[in-house]
Image: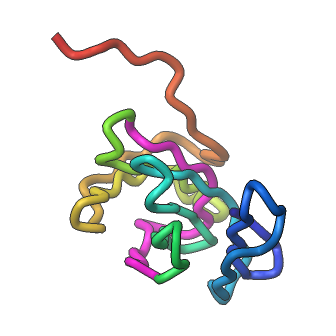
Amino acid sequence: MGSFDGNVYALDAASGEVSWRHDTGAPVSSSAAVAGDRVLIGSRSYDLFAFDAATGRSLATVPSSTTVTHGVAISPDSRYAFVSVEGKGSEPGKVDVYDLRTFTVAGSAEVGQQAGGIVFWRMEPAG
């Protein structure tokens, strides 16, 4: 997933054919699969969106805390999406955290200008 033409495409891995396409209305900057590839999460300039991976049905669109969303990382338990948000001009960069059960913003933290991507570096098991 991710395109500059404003569409999200799902490809069948065996055939290489497009199994569904959804017009998001704006270029898609980043994406991640969630919970056994059942949900696709993507970001575009001002929000996060979720799709059913099998059908392409839209599950949610949630505004970001500011503009210019960029990277997406999903927590190992598939509960949260962490989205880096660059901001514009002198706006601080942020990380928005989305609850993927309710598709709501769980929190937001300023991280400095030009927050261009995000990844989980190391995760330890609970306990």
Residue 15 in picture, x, y percent from top left: 82, 62
Which residue is painted at 50% across and 28% down in the image? Answer: 120
Q: Is residue 111 above or below residue 47?
A: above
Which residue is painted at 44% across and 47% down in the image? Answer: 36
Report whether 18 appears left or right of 100. Answer: right
Report whether 20 appears left or right of 97. Answer: right
Which of the pair 60/96 is nearer the observer?
Answer: 60
Q: Is residue 35 above or below residue 91?
A: above
Seen from this angle, which residue lies furthest left?
127
- Please state the extent of the stretch shown in magenta in the rendering: 58-75
Residue 21 in picture, x, y percent from top left: 69, 82
Residue 24 in picture, x, y percent from top left: 63, 84
Report whether 44 appears left or right of 78. Answer: right
Which of the pair 46/92 is nearer the observer?
Answer: 46
Query: How has the structure been colored for display?
Result: rainbow
Specify the quadrant that holds the N terminus.
Answer: bottom right
Give the number of callouts: 0
Which residue is painted at 66% across and 46% down in the image? Answer: 116
Which of the pair 105/24 is nearer the observer?
Answer: 24
Q: Is residue 110 magenta?
A: no
| Quarter assignment of residue 96 | bottom left
Q: Is residue 17 above or below residue 85?
A: below
Which residue is painted at 68% across and 74% down in the image? Answer: 8
Specify the quadrant that holds the C terminus.
Answer: top left
| Quarter assignment of residue 25 | bottom right
Which of the pair 9/42 is nearer the observer?
Answer: 9
Q: Is residue 61 magenta?
A: yes
Residue 16 in picture, x, y percent from top left: 83, 62
| Quarter assignment of residue 19 | bottom right
Provide the major secondary structure of the magenta segment. strand
Q: Is residue 47 above or below residue 95?
A: below
